[in-house]
Amino acid sequence: MYVMITDIEDYFIKGCGRCDRFDTPDCSTTRWMQGLSDLRTLCLDVGLDETVKWGHPCYMHAGRNIAIVGLFRGDFRISFFDAALMKDPEGVLEKQGPNTQHADMIRFTDNVQVMKRASVIQAYLQEAMGYARDGIRAPKNTDVPELPEELVTALDADAKLAEAFQALTPGRQKSYVINLGGAKKAETRIARIVKFRDKIIAGKGAMER
């Protein structure tokens, strides 16, 4: 059982705490330490508030999540929460995965790329901060149920789970959205997704046995 970090400084030194590579030389934080530090500086310099959510550095403004930092073995990234609003004039935003509706991240495969894109990153952060400050939100897509952020992340990271979820009937998909939406904490939603995995792969709804 892994315990996600709650102290922001731990992330930049030890990692997120979500796998057994935490606080070891093999943790991806070691490889991307300089780039992560540069991203952190850029976020703080535009006036964002720094916190920890889902074991990752999350940056907020006017009470809203603006961006979150994440990393993998092959890359690290900064992702925007209200991606549907972002204009992306530089064409740098990419989709996290096939289940992500909008291009929402800037991805880096080299530490030096962060400072090379510093002005673009900060311009995008300031754009997102403006939406939060003015209370502007993207219109909701009423054609399909809006998936919780934790479920989108899980589907993008697990191809087998994503394929099974997409194969569910709309009613069964909605049952998971409703169940997860009833949890107030992100940690609870994540734990439920882990428990639901076998049921989803079996083609069942949240309340089915």
Image (cartoon, rainbow, N blue to C red):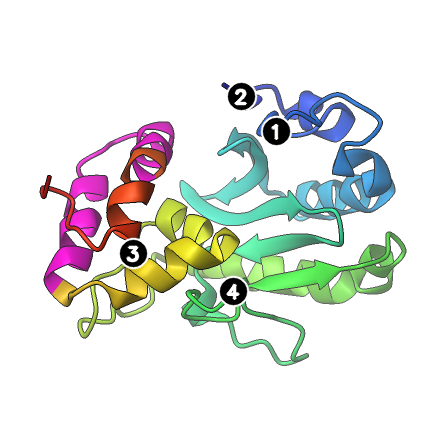
Specify which label sits upstream in the sequence, 4 or 3: 4
Mark 3 lies on residue: 147
Give the SS element for disc 1. loop
Q: How far apart in space, not on screen, are marks 2 and 3 (Cα)?
A: 25 Å
Amino acid under disc 1: Cys
Amino acid under disc 4: Gly
Q: Mark 4, residues whose alpha carbon is within 10 Å: few (<14), some, or many (≥20)?
A: some
Specify which label sits upstream in the sequence, 2 or 1: 2
Q: Residue at x 60, y 19 (%)?
A: 7
Q: Mark 1, residues whose alpha carbon is within 10 Å: few (<14), some, or many (≥20)?
A: few
Q: Quadrant of the C terminus?
A: top left
Residue 44 coordinates in the image, percent (x, y): 68, 40
Q: Which mark is residue 19?
A: 1
Do labels 4 and 3 touch, CB within 8 Å?
Answer: no
Q: Is 165 in front, or is 54?
A: 165
Specify which label sits upstream in the sequence, 2 or 3: 2
Q: How far apart in space, not on screen, are marks 2 and 1 (Cα)?
A: 6 Å
Amino acid under disc 2: Tyr
Residue 102 coordinates in the image, percent (x, y): 45, 71
